[in-house]
Image (cartoon, rainbow, N blue to C red):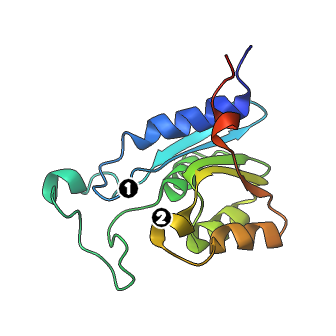
Amino acid sequence: MKPSFDHIFMKLATDLALRSHCVKAQVGAVLARDTRIISIGYNGPPAGTHNCDEEWPVDGCPRDSKGSCSLALHAEQNAILYAVKNGAKLEGATLYTTLSPCIACARLIFSAGIKQVYFSKSYAQYKGLASDEGVDFLNRFGVPTMKLEEEEILPSI
C-alpha cells in the first residue's frame, strides 16, 4: 500500500526536526499544495547567527520572559519566511508540523492564507498549558487544524 501524501509530508516534517540545533525541542514543518512541497522549516535561530547546541550545549539559549527561547524562530515561521523570501504563494497551502502551532504562529498561519494544518504532538502538552491556543484560534477562524494520530502517520503494512 502506498503511503498517503499526509503521511509523506508529516514524515518529512519529523525528519526535518532532526536538523534543529535546539537543545530543548526539535520541531519540523512542511508547507505543501496539491501534493507539491512549497517550503520546509525547522526551529532554530535565524540563518547566519549561531547554533544553540554549539554555543549553549547544556541548557540551550537564553530564555525570554515567558520561558521560551529568546533567539529561535519556530519551524512554522521558518517555513513561511523562506517561502515568502523566495516568492512562493502560500494561499491555500497545507502545513504539516510536528508540534501544534503556538498562538503567535497560528496568527501568522492564518494571515498567510494557509488553509489547513496537521500536527503530530500538542504544544500545550509540551508546555504544560491548559489548551492548545493556536489550534483553537485556527479552528475558530476557519483553518481546520487537527492531530494526525500515530496510526494515520505510519503506513500500514
Compared to 18, does 95 lie above or below? Answer: below
Q: Which part of the image, by quadrant, shows the N terminus?
A: top right
User: Is there any visible trace of residue 50 in the rendered image?
Assistant: no
Q: Which residue is drawn at 47% across and 64% down?
A: 126
Label 2 to label 1: alpha-carbon separation? 9 Å
Q: Nearer the viewer, mark 2 or mark 1?
A: 2
- Dot 1 falls on a residue whose secondary structure is loop
Count residues near mark 2 (Cα–Cα under 10 Å), then give few for <14, some for 14-19, many for 20+: few
Task: Tell me where residue 25 sits by quadrant.
Answer: bottom left
Q: Is residue 53 above or below residue 35?
A: below
**Dividing the picture into quarters, in which one does residue 8 lie?**
top right
Taking 118 as reference, is 97 left or right?
left
Image disc number at residue 25: 1
Secondary structure at badge 2 equals helix
Percent position of residue 55, x then y: 14, 57
Amino acid type for the residue under numbered disc 2: Tyr
Residue on which disc 2 sits: 126
Q: Considering depth in this image, is 19 or 78 the residue closer to the camera?
A: 19
Label 2–label 1 contact, CB within 8 A: yes
Among numbered discs 2 and 1, the one appearing first in the sequence: 1
Observer-nearest of 121 and 29 = 121
- State left or right for residue 59 relative to residue 117: left
- Position of residue 140 measured from the top left corner of the image (x, y, whole percent): 81, 73
Which amino acid is tagged 1? Answer: Ala
In the foreground, 73 or 125: 125
Query: Residue 128 appears at what percent x and percent y?
Result: 48, 73
The answer to whether residue 129 shows anywhere in this view is yes
Instruction: Name which residue lies at 66% across and 32% down.
Output: 7
Number of numbered discs: 2
